[in-house]
Structure formats: structure tokens, C-alpha cells
């Protein structure tokens, strides 16, 4: 098997309106589609699906609100991102973090979405 790319990521949330406010308003992700139990956002080349634990159809065996960690690459500086989050009263869980990885230095900060999912924001 030769994996080509990631198509979509599904996270479990407990409030679609709060998810819309966060992912569309704060992170500026375009809304692709919406149902009573799901919101789909464009996240780079991929799709981010925010799904209620009560959604029907195929889903994880134990959908748990707030159990996902998602890492997002951004073009803006972390200082710009921190100021942006301050305007929306988004608490920064940890940051600015600097780590030496194998081939490069990583600069990031961490926040939680309204459902408690951990979101890492990394400078690209």
C-alpha cells in the first residue's frame, strides 16, 4: 500500500455552533458543508469534520469529545497569532514553544477548541 495523503480528519465535539465560531470565525476555515450532526471545513488540502458523538453512520467505537490533538501549520508569526487569539479571548495552553527536531526548529503554541480538543499552532 502506498499512502498518498490525508483526506480528512474527524474530531468529536459537543456543540456545533461553538465549533463553527471557533474554526470558521477564529481560525478562518471555510465551511464546506453542514448537517444536523456535522460541520465540514476546508483545512489546507484536507477536510476537517467536526462531528457530534450522536452522529449516525460509521464512526469510531467510542467517540469522545475533546480527545483529539490537531496540529496546524500557519504562515503568520506566533506573535501575530497570539495577538489574534487575544482578540477572541482564546487562552493559550502552552507557548511559545521552541523545540529542536531532527532537521529543523519548531516554533508552536497550544490552545484548546471549545470542546477541549488540543490544537497545536506551528509556524511553517
Image: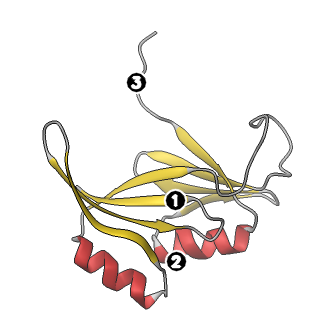
Residue 51 versus residue 29 in the image, above or below: above
Q: Secondary structure at mark 1?
A: strand
x 64%, y 68%: residue: 19
Label 3 crowding class (10 Å Cα cut-off): few <14, some 14-19, many 20+? few
CB contact under 8 Å: marks 3 and 2: no
Q: Observer-nearest residue: 37 or 68?
A: 68
Pointer 1 or 3: first along the chain:
3
Pointer 2 or 1: first along the chain:
2
Pointer 3 or 2: first along the chain:
3
Q: CA distance from mark 3 to mark 2?
A: 30 Å
Q: Quadrant of residue 124?
A: bottom left
Q: Observer-nearest residue: 55 or 102?
A: 102
Q: CA distance from mark 2 to mark 1?
A: 18 Å
- Tell me if 1 is positioned left or right of 20 in this view: left
Q: Nearer the viewer, mark 2 or mark 1?
A: 1
Q: Which residue is mark 2?
A: 25
Question: Tag on residue 118?
Answer: 1
Q: CA distance from mark 1 to mark 3?
A: 26 Å
- Tell me if 110 is positioned left or right of 14 in this view: left
Q: Quadrant of residue 40?
A: bottom right
Q: Secondary structure at mark 3?
A: loop
x 32%, y 85%: residue: 83
Horizontal and vertical percent position of residue 43: 46, 54
Label 2 crowding class (10 Å Cα cut-off): few <14, some 14-19, many 20+? few
Q: Which residue is mark 3?
A: 4
Residue 116 versus residue 52 in the image, above or below: below
Label 1 crowding class (10 Å Cα cut-off): few <14, some 14-19, many 20+? some
x 74%, y 36%: residue: 60
Horizontal and vertical percent position of residue 71: 41, 52
Q: Secondary structure at mark 2?
A: helix
x 46%, y 9%: residue: 1
Horizontal and vertical percent position of residue 52: 77, 56
Amino acid at each position: 500500500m502506498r499512502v498518498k495523503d490525508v483526506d480528512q480528519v474527524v474530531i468529536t465535539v459537543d456543540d456545533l455552533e461553538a465549533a463553527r465560531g471557533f474554526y470558521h470565525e477564529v481560525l478562518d476555515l471555510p465551511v464546506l458543508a453542514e448537517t444536523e450532526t456535522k460541520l465540514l471545513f476546508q483545512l489546507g488540502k484536507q477536510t476537517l469534520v467536526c462531528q457530534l458523538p450522536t452522529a449516525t453512520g460509521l464512526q469510531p467505537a467510542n467517540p469522545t469529545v475533546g480527545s483529539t490533538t490537531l496540529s496546524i501549520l500557519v504562515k503568520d508569526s506566533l506573535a501575530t497569532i497570539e495577538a489574534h487569539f487575544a482578540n477572541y479571548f482564546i487562552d493559550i495552553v502552552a507557548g511559545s514553544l521552541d523545540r529542536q527536531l531532527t532537521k529543523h526548529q519548531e516554533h508552536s503554541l497550544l490552545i484548546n477548541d471549545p470542546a477541549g480538543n488540543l490544537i497545536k499552532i506551528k509556524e511553517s
